[in-house]
Amino acid sequence: MSSEDLKIARVSAPHDVVIVDTIELRHPSFPANIYLTNQKEDFTAALEPDAGVSPLTVLFRHAGFKITLPKMGTNGVQTLNLAMSNLDREVSRHLEIALLNPVPIEVFYRPYIYDKWDSPAEIPPRKLSLDSAVVDALVANGRATTIDWINKKLHKLIYDVERFPGLRRL
């Protein structure tokens, strides 16, 4: 599935296409990168060829997460919230060690199309920098920064009814 197909799926929301959200947490103090999905089951998928990690096929583990986008602003750098399930304590163990280190935790957001695990639906993945986190028994909440997502044109396209007829109101 190409990035163009993902754009169409996001705009017209066909009933037979499911977008699967995933995140990767990467830090030098982690014994291995952490791959999470908000799907109800684990799955194996390929990363993009230039992901900079090996192997390129990884297991995304089910662990609910939610990204809350920032409010609109003009400062160019946005802070968003990332909440991750901490039921098995793996995330918290790694976060506590990494947050003692001045190097920020890199977070990569990759969408996939369900049953199309040979490549992410969006290349390159969106990269965030996790600056701080608060961990409790159930949830790890972090603040991440990124380039201004809110004020950026979505995929640098103008969404109109000629190009995306699903936008037409009946």
Image (spheres, grey):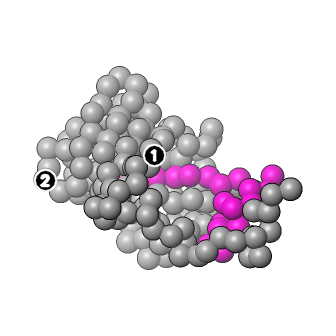
Query: Residue 66, image x and y in percent?
Result: 48, 41
Please, is residue 110 above or below residue 157 in the view? Answer: above
User: In the shown orientation, is residue 55 left or right of residue 147?
Assistant: right
Label of residue 102 in the image: 2
Please tell me whether mark 2 sits on a helix, a strand or a loop.
loop
Residue at 44% x, 49% y: name it. 69
Out of 106 and 73, give the one closest to the viewer.
73
Q: Indicate left or right for 160 with 130 as reference.
A: right
Magenta span contains residue 145: no
Q: Residue at x 43, y 64 (%)?
A: 151
Position of the C terminus by quadrant:
bottom right
Above or below: residue 145 compared with residue 160: above
Label 1 crowd (10 A; few <14 / some 14-19 / many >=20): some
Disc 1, SS: strand
Instruction: Say few, some or many: other residues with alpha carbon within 10 Å of mark 2 (under 14 / 14 to 19 / 20 or more).
Output: few
Residue furthest out toward the right: 170
User: On the image, numbered disc 1 is attached to which residue?
Assistant: 67
Query: What is the x, y in percent for residue 158?
Result: 61, 74
Q: Is residue 13 magenta?
A: yes
Spatial CA distance of label 1 from label 2 is 23 Å
Left or right position of 47 against 70 = right
Examine the image and state in which quarter residue 33 appears.
Answer: bottom left
CB atoms of marks 1 and 2 within 8 Å: no
Amino acid identity at mark 1: Ile
Give the residue at x 38% y 71%. Answer: 52
Q: Which residues are magenta?
A: 1-25
Q: In the rendered structure, which disc, 1 or 2, sits on the residue that comes first in sequence? A: 1
